[in-house]
Image (tube, rainbow, N blue to C red):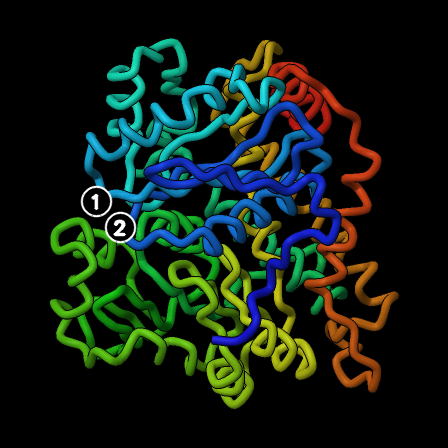
């Protein structure tokens, strides 16, 4: 698939992988007493994969000046199997409580990821006597506006805001207007986050292609699930609720290989499922479409190194995934803050909108100054990577981020800095 984008940091003194019998915990930055990331439980979970995800969390937290280290856990077990998860949590118990014998100053704040769920995680905590760590907070609540948990909505919002900033830069004279109005897009992985994105974009953009693990489909105005502009989002969601990933087979449209989605002639593509999907070959497909201006990921590390280079050299803006999919991390600060929040859902949306907008705008402006291929700069002979510039910015910000030992004080700082609806 090519070289992976997330390398380990060269200064190995802050990176650690803790091996236990039933898995491992990867921590990308031991400088901070609190580390954050989910638990992925799969029979074939790989240490390399988990280490990369921990590094992605590090970039994400660093980008917004949040003094928490990136982390990720990999549990070797069957998907959604409670006994397997219990065994793993018992093995890393000291990290959950912050009193591990070898790492007494490191607390791992975690939750469900692929192969687990919130209910399963809570059941496992109860089984090992850590009921006090159960927190059914804001991100678990259903959104008032959408039929989804807030976790999925704020993640989707970050993707939408990143796209807004990208197309504002591409059309600076239209900044007073909605930069996404009338744009076309394709969605890889029509799951909960993707359905949140589709609902946020429903009256603004036209969904022309989507995929699940069962295959990809393209809008056809003769279908009852489409109009002349693209798919009818509400009808798609109804079908997905009924049939799951196989709903694409039930629509009466031709079903292609999942990767065929990347041949779409759209304005932007949202990778939302597979890691490292954008290989050299798929990047070439995207360039050949002649229409794609940007990739705005909802998933983690969708690019291979070579795929990224091909896209950027040809003027496609490759949004850093650790910026566009940062919504849940930012919104989670509402769960920990000691400040009085009149409307937590509104404040969470504000934080995500403010933070992603500011960081993306600054990155794009600096990218233009540095010679990255953005808008009118796309034909410059020198090549600079916007993606790698974002990593450099994150790590530079990390060096000046103060150490705080309380999640409440960290959350208070983030909420004060970004929220406008306290």
Give the side of residue 67 with respect to residue 277, left or right: right
Q: Residue at (31%, 53%) from the top-left corner?
A: 191
Where disc 1 sits, the SS reads: loop
Give the side of residue 125 with respect to residue 264, left or right: left
Q: Which residue is mark 1?
A: 78
Evaluate if marks 1 and 2 touch, with contact meaning CB atoms under 8 Å apart: yes
Q: State the quadrant of the C terminus.
A: top right
Give residue 210's position: percent from left, percent from top: 33, 68
Q: Quadrant of residue 358?
A: top right
Classify 10 Å Cα crowding around label 1: few (below 14), some (14-19), many (20 and above). Answer: some
Give residue 215's position: percent from left, percent from top: 25, 72
Q: Is residue 24 positioned above or below 412 on the image? A: below
Q: Can you see residue 298?
A: no
Q: Residue at (12%, 51%) from the top-left corner?
A: 242
Q: Residue at (72%, 65%) from the top-left corner?
A: 386
Along the viewing direction, whichever of 322 and 315 lies nearer the viewer: 322
Along the viewing direction, whichever of 111 and 414 lies nearer the viewer: 111
Compute the Cα span from label 1 to label 2.
5 Å
Q: Which residue is mark 2?
A: 43
Classify 10 Å Cα crowding around label 2: few (below 14), some (14-19), many (20 and above). Answer: few
Q: Can you see residue 56?
A: yes
Q: Quadrant of residue 121?
A: top left
Where disc 2 sits, the SS reads: loop
Along the viewing direction, whichever of 94 and 81 lies nearer the viewer: 94
Give residue 231's position: percent from left, percent from top: 30, 67
Q: Residue furthest bottom?
A: 288
Give residue 23's position: percent from left, percent from top: 37, 41
Q: Residue at (83%, 86%) from the top-left corner?
A: 381
Whichever of callouts 1 and 2 sits on the residue coming sooner in the sequence is 2
């Amino acid at each position: 698939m090519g070289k992976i984008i997330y390398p380990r940091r060269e200064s190995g003194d802050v990176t650690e992988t803790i091996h236990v019998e039933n898995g491992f915990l990867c921590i990308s930055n031991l400088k901070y007493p609190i580390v954050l990331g989910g638990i992925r439980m799969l029979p074939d979970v790989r240490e390399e994969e988990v280490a990369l995800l921990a590094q992605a969390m590090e970039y994400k937290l660093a980008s917004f000046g949040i003094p928490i280290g990136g982390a990720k856990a990999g549990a070797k077990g069957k998907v959604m199997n409670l006994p397997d998860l219990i065994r793993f949590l018992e093995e890393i118990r000291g990290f959950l409580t912050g009193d591990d014998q070898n790492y007494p100053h490191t607390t791992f704040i975690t939750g469900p990821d692929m192969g687990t769920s919130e209910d399963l995680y809570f059941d496992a905590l109860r089984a090992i006597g850590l009921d006090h760590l159960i927190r059914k907070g804001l991100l678990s609540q259903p959104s008032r506006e959408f039929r989804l948990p807030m976790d999925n909505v704020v993640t989707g919002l970050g993707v939408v805001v990143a796209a807004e900033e990208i197309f504002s830069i591409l059309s600076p004279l239209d900044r007073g207007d909605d930069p996404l109005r009338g744009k076309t897009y394709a969605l890889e992985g029509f799951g909960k986050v993707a359905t949140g994105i589709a609902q946020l974009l429903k009256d603004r953009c036209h969904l022309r292609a989507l995929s699940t693990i069962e295959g990809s489909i393209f809008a056809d105005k003769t279908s009852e699930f489409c109009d002349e502009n693209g798919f009818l989002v509400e009808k798609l969601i109804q079908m997905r609720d009924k049939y799951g990933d196989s709903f694409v087979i039930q629509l009466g449209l031709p079903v292609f290989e999942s990767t065929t989605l990347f041949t779409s002639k759209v304005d932007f593509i949202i990778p939302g499922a597979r890691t490292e999907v954008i290989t050299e070959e798929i990047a070439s497909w995207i360039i050949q479409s002649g229409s794609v201006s940007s990739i705005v990921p909802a998933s983690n590390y969708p690019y291979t190194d070579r795929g990224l280079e091909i896209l950027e050299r040809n003027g496609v803006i490759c949004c850093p995934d650790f910026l566009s999919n940062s919504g849940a991390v930012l919104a989670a600060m509402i769960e920990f803050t000691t400040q009085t929040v009149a409307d937590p859902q509104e404040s969470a949306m504000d934080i995500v909108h403010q933070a992603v907008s500011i960081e993306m705008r600054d990155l794009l402006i600096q990218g233009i100054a540095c010679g990255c291929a953005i808008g009118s700069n796309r034909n410059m002979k020198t090549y600079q990577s916007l993606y790698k510039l974002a990593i450099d910015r994150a790590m530079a910000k990390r060096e000046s981020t103060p150490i705080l030992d309380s999640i409440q004080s960290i959350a208070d700082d983030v909420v004060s800095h970004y929220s406008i609806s306290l």
